[in-house]
């Protein structure tokens, strides 16, 4: 499974990074960095939580 | 056999004084009747369950905003071209201009100033001991912040608030309340049209809109509608959130104790206030094609009320939804909408809300409130007055 950020929609709320610290991070500039696009099976729940909390639906999971 | 795909019809009036004062029993009936119901009085549909509202908001290709988000043709006509009433690609161009000034990254530098303003407002009110939490606190705060950020000239500012409230109510169903509100929406647009770009503070959010038009990023005709988005969306919503917070904390003192003891709960507490008393009750979408809503067939062209306020109390989603619990942290509530049109100002709204709650938590031990006066509005829910007395925290008394 992969986690994909739609950069045109992402506005940097960072809720996703709080939900999935293994996968996503807001850098010092306030921009979202994908730490690991590939979601390890142990992180699947984190990835789903991140997708769920993004207020502008900028994240999606792909098989 | 016919019943399986038939949408239940409910002959409800959602806009009486009684319902606008307490809409929650009617929302529950709508949720229990089905994933989507038909409301013949408005020749419209309504979705009240969390999962369906959220899925509908995410699917902007099936549920368009471009035919207006209100319940009457006049308002849907008058709001053409405003960001909330657009679809991509137009929407995304407008959104970029707003997000460049409203995104969390863009407002980081405002944090210290807004926190200072919150302290300066709250400290004297607490010393005074008694105040109106709506007028003196909830209104005073966003008005000074948002109108300064937009960079509006001083004259005319006093009228902006009445207009903003009406700009929401004008999107209700045809009838006397809508007729009364509509001219005020027109006044607001006329006032904004009369402002010359160089009257706006250099560097302000308002000026940035005109700069974007000058740079060819957006059309010149988009400037006034975008200004209107700031003035309308940025005021009563936040005002209602702040006064609702005081009201709920007055009635749930043990929840206030939790926040005071652990201020890291403030973001969760604000989310919970927004969930349980969503300032925006609904906006509409129009189905662009036949859509399957949880097994019910919704015809193309159907206008659907997306009941955010109902979704936020859906017992299918929330455990004990009428309980106010600052530890719930309902991050995925729909009070800011969701998806493409999800509130562009939520970073600022949260910053304002967090700053006010933090300033209060440092100084107030207990709120006591008298009977609230409700402000009747067809789209947004909030108070008009809330007589409040506070017991200060010992050290700052
Ligand atoms: C607690 C305060 C607020 C609440 C509850 C709130 C609620 C909402 C909701 C429900 C929407 C969704 C519209 C839709 O689904 O069609 C929205 C959109 C919007 N809000 Fe807010 N809002 C708040 C504060 C603000 C502030 C402070 C600003 C700006 C200064 C703002 C600007 C906007 C704009 C520009 C949109 C349109 C976004 C778009 O169509 O892409 N809001 N808001
Ligand atoms: S929550 Fe959404 S908008 Fe915010 S940083 Fe994550 S992907 Fe971007």
Image (cartoon, rainbow, N blue to C red):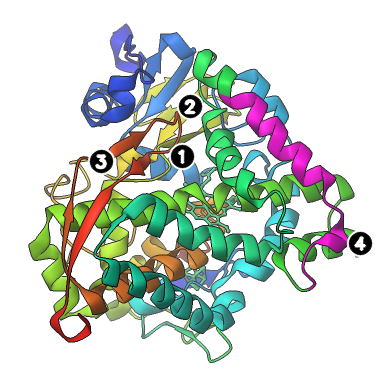
**Disc ID at residue B304:** 2
Circle nearer the N terminus (2, 3):
2
Callout 1: residue from which chain? B
Image spot of residue B133 (x, y percent): 32, 54
Mark in front: 3 vs 1: 3
Q: Residues within 10 Å of mark 3 (few under 14, many from 20)?
A: some
Does the beta carbon of the residue at mark 2 sit less than 8 Å from ligand 1? no
Image side of residue B54 versus residue B271, left or right: right
The vertical placement of B54 against B181, above or below, is below
The C terminus of chain B lies in quadrant: bottom left
Q: Are marks 3 and 1 in contact (CB under 8 Å)?
A: no
Most distant residue in the front direction = B128
Q: Residues at marks 2 and 4, common chain?
A: yes
Image spot of residue A46 (x, y percent): 31, 74
Circle nearer the N terminus (2, 1):
1
Viewer-closest of B132 and B108 = B132
The vertical placement of B88 against B23, above or below, is below
Residue stretch in magenta: B181-202
- Report how far apart the C-alphas of labels 3 and 1 lie in the structure: 34 Å
Q: Residues at marks 3 and 4, common chain?
A: yes
Mark in front: 2 vs 3: 3
Q: Residues within 10 Å of mark 2 (few under 14, many from 20)?
A: many
**Disc ID at residue B214:** 4
Is residue B227 visible to the viewer in this orientation of the structure? yes
Query: Residue B39 appears in which quarter of the rendering?
Result: top left
Residue at 33 percent across and 33 percent down: it is B48
- Report how far apart the C-alphas of labels 2 and 4 lie in the structure: 37 Å
Image side of residue B213 versus residue A23, left or right: right
- Report how far apart the C-alphas of labels 3 and 4 lie in the structure: 47 Å
The N terminus of chain B lies in quadrant: top left
Residue at 47 percent across and 14 percent down: it is B42
């Amino acid at each position: 499974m992969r986690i994909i950020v739609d950069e045109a929609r992402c506005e940097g709320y960072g809720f996703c990074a709080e939900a999935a610290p293994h996968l996503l991070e807001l850098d010092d500039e306030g921009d979202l960095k994908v730490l690991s696009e590939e979601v390890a099976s142990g992180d699947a729940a984190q990835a789903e939580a991140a997708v769920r909390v993004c207020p502008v639906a900028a994240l999606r999971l792909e098989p | 056999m016919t019943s399986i795909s038939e949408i239940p019809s409910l002959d409800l009036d959602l806009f009486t004084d009684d319902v606008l004062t307490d809409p929650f029993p009617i929302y529950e009936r709508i949720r229990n009747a089905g994933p989507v119901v038909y409301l013949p009085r408005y020749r419209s549909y309504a979705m009240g369950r969390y999962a369906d509202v959220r899925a509908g908001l995410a699917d902007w290709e099936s549920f368009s905003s471009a035919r207006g988000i209100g319940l009457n043709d006049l308002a849907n006509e008058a709001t053409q071209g405003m960001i909330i009433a657009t679809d991509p690609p137009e929407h995304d161009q407008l959104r970029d201009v707003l997000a460049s000034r409203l995104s969390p990254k863009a407002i980081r530098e405002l944090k210290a100033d807004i926190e200072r303003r919150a302290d300066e407002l709250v400290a004297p009110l607490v010393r005074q001991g008694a105040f109106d939490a709506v007028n003196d606190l909830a209104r005073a705060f966003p008005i000074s912040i948002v109108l300064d950020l937009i960079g509006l000239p001083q004259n005319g500012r006093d009228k902006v608030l009445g207009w903003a409230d009406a700009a929401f109510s004008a999107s209700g169903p045809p009838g006397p309340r809508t007729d009364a509100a509509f001219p005020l929406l027109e006044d607001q647009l006329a006032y904004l049209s009369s402002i010359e770009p160089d009257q706006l503070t250099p560097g302000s959010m308002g000026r940035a809109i005109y700069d974007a038009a000058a740079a060819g990023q957006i059309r010149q005709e988009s400037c006034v509608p975008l200004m209107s988005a700031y003035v309308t969306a940025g005021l009563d919503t936040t005002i209602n959130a702040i006064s609702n917070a005081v009201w709920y904390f007055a009635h749930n003192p043990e929840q206030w104790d939790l926040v005071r003891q652990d201020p890291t709960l403030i973001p969760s507490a604000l989310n919970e206030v927004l969930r349980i008393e969503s300032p925006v009750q609904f906006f509409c979408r129009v189905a662009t094609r036949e859509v399957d809503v949880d097994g019910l067939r919704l015809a193309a062209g159907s206008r659907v009320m997306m009941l955010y306020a109902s979704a936020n109390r859906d017992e299918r989603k929330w455990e004990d939804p009428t309980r106010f619990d600052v530890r719930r942290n309902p991050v995925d509530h729909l009070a800011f909408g969701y998806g493409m049109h999800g509130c562009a100002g939520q970073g600022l709204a949260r910053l304002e809300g967090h700053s006010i709650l933090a300033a209060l938590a440092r100084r107030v031990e207990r709120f006591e409130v008298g009977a609230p006066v409700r402000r009747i509005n067809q789209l947004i829910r909030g108070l008009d007055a809330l007589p409040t007395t506070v017991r200060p925290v010992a050290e700052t008394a």
